[in-house]
Image (tube, helix red, strand yellow):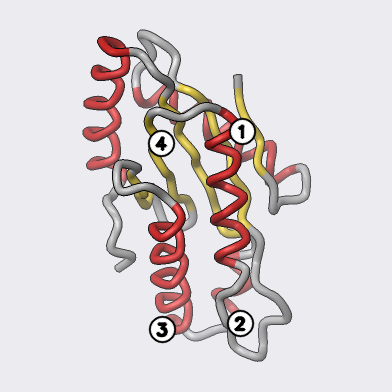
Amino acid sequence: MTGVPNRALLSELANQQMNYQQRHGGELWLLVWTIDELSALSRSCTAIDVDTFLRSVTERVKSCIRQSDTPARLDEHRFAILISDANEFVATAVADRIRRNVRRISLPASQNSPPGLSFGMSVYGAEENFETWLSRSEIALGAAVRAGGNQTVAQD
């Protein structure tokens, strides 16, 4: 529906990048994000409108990242971006750029303002497996949501 890889393909691509990073160095970042108030948006719009909105969001996300970065959909409400050869400043800047770009999407009149985006992110730690790394990014996402949403939190 959104035209981006699913969790299984993200895991496969992340494992390739993790192996490359272990051999050649550089930082790998995993951003996990959600659309704040997506459930409320779904209730106020038709299913077609929500699908159209999600496709618009993923297109805007793809326009904010490099071709070498990988966007993915983890499940109904969570998405991810794998960013290679970056640092925390770059990863945060990507999240901010996506947030600004998505807020420009036109929504139905029933929605007062575009929803915010919450991001949790973490850098890959040597010898860490994908599930552990993903879990750390999800913990950071949870912290961003609990803090009021529409922000980015990095996990050590």
Q: CA distance from mark 4 to mark 2?
A: 33 Å
- Image quarter of residue 81: top left
Do the CB atoms of the residues marked 2 and 3 lie less than 8 Å apart? Answer: no
Q: Compared to 86, does 40 lie above or below?
A: below
Residue 83 numbered tag: 4
| Mark nearer the viewer, 1 or 4 | 4
The Cα atoms of the two marked residues, 1 and 3, are separated by 31 Å
The answer to whether residue 59 is above or below residue 32 is below
Q: Amino acid at mark 3?
A: Ile
Question: Which residue is label 2 attached to?
Answer: 44
Q: What amino acid does circle 4 point to? A: Ile
Q: Earlier in the sequence, mark 1 or mark 4?
A: 4
Query: What crowding class fits label 1: few (fewer than 14 Cα within 10 Å), some (14-19), or many (20 or more)?
Result: many
Quadrant of the drawing holding the N terminus: bottom left
Label 1 sits on a secondary structure element that is helix
Distance from Cα at disc 2 to Cα at disc 3: 12 Å
Task: Farthest residue to the right: give it.
Answer: 147
Look at mark 3 in the image and give the residue it sits on: 48
Q: Secondary structure at mark 3?
A: helix
Residue 102 coordinates in the image, percent (x, y): 56, 66
- In the rendered structure, which disc, 1 or 3, sits on the residue that comes first in sequence? 3
Residue 53 or residue 85, whichever sits in front:
85
Q: Which mark sits nearer the N-terminus, 4 or 2?
A: 2
Asked whether 1 or 91 is in front, the reply is 91
What residue did someone put label 1 on?
Answer: 140
Q: x%, y% of residue 26? A: 39, 18
Horizontal and vertical percent for residue 131? 38, 26
Going from N to C along the chain, the mark reached first, 4 or 3, is 3
